Amino acid sequence: MTRPNVLRKATSIDDLRNIARRHVPRAFFEYADHGSYTQSTMRANRSDLEAIRLRQRVAIDVDSRDLSTTIIGERAELPLALAPIGLCGMQYGDGEILAARAAQEAGIPFCLSTMSICSIEDVAAAVDKPFWFQLYVMRDRGFVRSLIERAIEAKCSALMPTLDLQILGQRHCDIKNGMTVPPEITFSNVMDVATKPSWAWSILKGKRKTFGNIAGHISGMDSVNTLAQWMSQQFDPTLNWKDMDWIRSIWPGKIILKGIMDVEDAKIAASLGVSAIVVSNHGGRQLDGAKSSISELEKIVDAVGSDVDVMFDGGIRTGQDVLRALALGAKSCMVGRAFVYGLGAGGQAGVSKAIDILKKELDVSMALTGTRSVREITSGILAH
Ligand code: FNR
């Protein structure tokens, strides 16, 4: 169910967040909205971005502007990709398919999470263009191999191993809300869902109600309880750089390593000959107390930017934020919550709205800094 009137009035990602909060049950809204522990790193992602001031320039002809670029060698209409998000399909039924379609329409990459509700095959069947697949390396390496093989079969155009979730950071809200997939039937959940009929309808109509890449692909893992138990034991603290060789031996295509926050790690990652790395602290959902991802970006670009494309995510809520990250050397950015709020607010139209808001803000802000193309964005547009 789209909500054209509500969406039309939204003028910012914050508006989409407020709409999503009204339409998505609390357990799933807070799952997306919150960070780990005290949430200090999540807050720093925002406040450090906002603290970066841009240089206002005038009397430069900026009539013709071009926001297109290339991301890992492929043309993109914006320097932006949709980040991998677990459980998108619990923000809105078939959420991953809808987000992938919105990304395709906007001409930007979409990355499907290992922990998605729609499966790799569901998304491949629903979109024409290739998408990226994000990989969690789990203890069951046979299963990880089969995931990579399924991504090859689905013609995914890049594999994105995520390195910063070898063990799960805790979000207090998920425990307090009893967040389970599918939702547990408790009195407060039922009351909450009862006040969110359009959400319930979209989920009912959706293809799947549980982890689509996992359920049905591991024997004995069809019941919800055993699946949850299996997954909680599957994140693998032994994950190390040697595993990258193993991934390479199976995956022949482009690789983007996600979750780099340290110059030493960036140097190792760049030496592996990958297509890109993503400077990311998982949106402040893992190591609470880590620095904001924007505060580490420039150092990492200085260290490895000539060897590998450096992408950025964490805290982007405006086009100005995209501009700030590009000015500090990112080749492109990913957004997580910004599009998830759009999805919760209004399905595919909501994701398109989120992308459109970021695009227009980026376009206007580029013009006001005297910049005509993504190539022209340098640290010279920052006010020091
Ligand atoms: C994530 N993120 C994430 N990353 C990943 O590699 N695999 C995943 O399954 C998920 N799942 C996920 C769920 C939700 C609800 C959020 C908010 C985030 C992290 C994500 O890809 C990205 O790094 C952050 O979202 C970026 O920060 P912002 O844009 O949300 O502030």
Image (cartoon, rainbow, N blue to C red):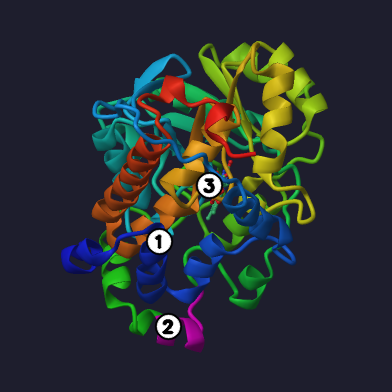
> Where residue 35 appears, x then y in whole percent?
64, 61
Task: Give the CA separation, mark 3 to mark 1.
Answer: 13 Å
> Where residue 356 appears, x then y in whole percent?
29, 46
Q: Is residue 156 magenta?
A: no
Q: Nearer the viewer, mark 3 or mark 1?
A: 1
If you read the primary sequence from the N terminus, does the residue marked by circle 3 or circle 1 appear first? 1
Do the residues bearing badges 2 and 3 touch, measured as CB atoms within 8 Å?
no
In the picture, the quarter occupied by the C terminus is top right
80 on left or right of 224:
left
- Give the residue displayed 60% in from the left and 33% down from the top: 143
Residue sitting farthest toward the left: 5
Instruction: Determine whether the residue tagged by mark 2 lies in a helix, strand or loop.
Output: helix
Task: Give the CA separation, mark 2 to mark 3.
Answer: 24 Å
In the picture, the quarter occupied by the N terminus is bottom left
> Where residue 279 appears, x then y in whole percent?
64, 34
Q: Which residue is mark 2?
A: 192
Judge whether residue 78 can be spotted in this image. yes
Residue 235, placed above or below residue 370: below
- Residue 47: which quarter of the image? bottom right
Q: Which residues are magenta?
A: 184-192
- How many numbered circles does the render carry? 3
Residue sitting farthest toward the front: 59
Rendered image: mark on residue 115: 3
Amino acid type of disc 1? Answer: Gln
Residue 340, placed above or below residue 380: below
Q: Is residue 185 magenta?
A: yes
